[in-house]
Image (cartoon, grey):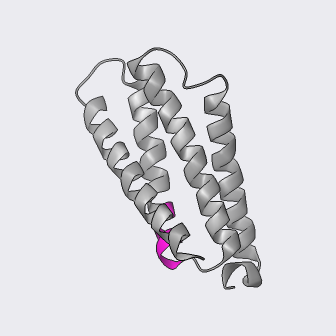
Amino acid sequence: MTVWMRRVLVGVAGLIGAVGVATAAMASHGEDVRNLAAISAMALAHAPVLLVVGLVGRSRALSIAGLVLAAGCIIFVADLAMRHSLGTALFPGAAPIGGGGMILGWLAVAVAGMFRGLLNE
C-alpha cells in the first residue's frame, strides 16, 4: 500500500469518526433524529475499519477496498446529513450509491482476506 493511500485512509477514518461522535451527541439532544442516528451508526461502524486498513493494510487490493468503503460511507453519510439539514438529497440516488459502495468495499475486504497474496503483498 502506498504512503498516500495510508494517509488518506487514516485521515478519512479520523474525520468519519468525529462525524459519528458529533452526530451521536446531536441525536441525543434533539427531535427527529432518525437520520442523525443512522449517520452516527454508519460513521462509527466504518471509521475503525478504515483506521485499521490504513495502519496495517499491506496490499493494493486491501487499500482499494478501503478507499471504496470510505467513498461509499462518505457519500451515504453526506446524503443523510443533507436530508436532515436541508431536506434534500445530496444528488439523486446518493444513498443507494453510497450504500452500494460500502457493500462493495466490504466484499472487497472479504476477498482480500481470503487470498493470502492479496492480503500480504
Residue at (39%, 30%) from the top-left corner? Answer: 36
Task: Note whether 38 is above or below 20 in the view shown.
Answer: above
Instruction: Identify the residue at image location x=67%, y=26%.
Output: 93
Q: Residue 28's image quarter?
A: top left
Which quarter of the image is occupied by the N terminus? bottom right
Q: Residue at x 52, y 75 (%)?
A: 3
Q: Is residue 94 magenta?
A: no
The secondary structure that dominates the magenta segment is helix
Is 38 placed above or below 3 here? Answer: above
Count of numbered tags: 0
- Along the line of sight, the residue nearer the viewer: 79 or 110: 79
Image coords of residue 109 (percent x, y)? 67, 65
Q: Examine the image and state in which quarter residue 84 appears.
A: top left
Across and down, in percent, residue 51 comes to 45, 66
**Residue 85 percent coordinates (x, y):** 38, 20
Expressed as whole percent of the image width and height from the top left, the position of residue 121 reads 69, 85
Q: Nearer the viewer, residue 37 or 104?
A: 104
Find the residue positioned furthest to the left: 29
At 61% from the left edge and 31% from the top edge, which residue is drawn? 95
Quadrant of residue 30 within the rendered picture: top left
Q: Is residue 13 above or below residue 103?
A: below
What span is colored magenta in the figure?
49-56
Q: Is residue 32 above or below residue 63?
A: above
The single residue placed furthest to the front in the displayed view is 4
